[in-house]
Amino acid sequence: DQQVKQNSPSLSVQEGRISILNCDYTNSMFDYFLWYKKYPAEGPTFLISISSIKDKNEDGRFTVFLNKSAKHLSLHIVPSQPGDSAVYFCAAGGFGNEKLTFGTGTRLTIIP
Amino acid sequence: NAGVTQTPKFQVLKTGQSMTLQCAQDMNHEYMSWYRQDPGMGLRLIHYSVGAGITDQGEVPNGYNVSRSTTEDFPLRLLSAAPSQTSVYFCASTSGTSSYEQYFGPGTRLTVT
């Protein structure tokens, strides 16, 4: 049972445009959500997070939106740059511990 | 700070062989974990530890053992390697005090033939 789902395996976006990556979850007990970025042959690196008490968090070009009623979160990257080409993982945590459940990832390709 | 380090980077094993994947962190983090990444499967939790002497199973623990004798080290042992254990393995750590943000090592690519 996949508790965190990223239904788009890949996404291509023109440089300078907005990239929107989506993530759905099924467990309403999750109270913290994170996005990670992964380049080939490297470990994932933390990008941005949001707690369930918020519906939006911004950090520079990156914004995460959380819709608790729909159990959906999205990552917006504006403007998209070639260096943003990577695999993006959505992750969820909660229950008072540090365990994270990851989605399957979305490969983002920025077209120059 | 070196962060989270993993050795080796690459390893090829024959079916039935055993080996240990090493993981160390120098951030004094209490929580450490092991994940495996497979195509189309994302990152799946194998084992985790909330502190020295304490370990627990994750989502896919079968065929793997862990121990945590120090805060810094969290080795993952493959007891009898199987082709299904061909994967990329990541170790991660977090302080656990302020956020769920985990810091990942560079990974070990394991092939079992």
Image (spheres, coloured by chain):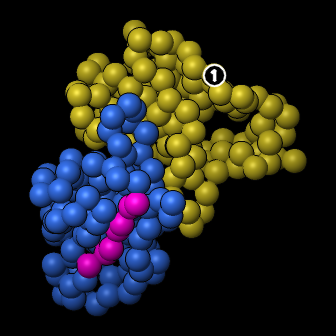
Chain colours: A yellow, B blue
The residue positioned 25% from the left and 69% from the top of the image is: B76
Residue B97 location (% of width, % of height): 33, 34
Q: Residues within 10 Å of mark 1 (few under 14, many from 20)?
A: some
Residue B102 location (% of width, % of height): 41, 45
Left or right of B39 on screen, residue B44? left
SS class, disc 1: strand
| Residue B44 visible in rendering | no
Residue B67 location (% of width, % of height): 16, 65
Quadrant showing the N terminus of chain A: top left
Q: Nearer the viewer, residue A8 or A48?
A: A48
Chain letter of mark 1 equals A
**Magenta residues: mostly which secondary structure?**
strand
The residue positioned 73% from the left and 30% from the top of the image is: A61
The residue positioned 40% from the left and 16% from the top of the image is: A52
Q: Nearer the viewer, residue A57 or A89?
A: A57
Q: Is residue B22 magenta?
A: yes
Q: Amino acid at mark 1?
A: Glu
Residue A33 location (% of width, % of height): 43, 29
Left or right of B101 on screen, residue B17? left
The residue positioned 17% from the left and 65% from the top of the image is: B69
Task: Read off the residue under disc 1.
Answer: A58
| Residue A29 visible in rendering | yes
Q: How many marks?
A: 1
Q: Is residue B93 magenta?
A: no
Range of magenta residues = B20-26
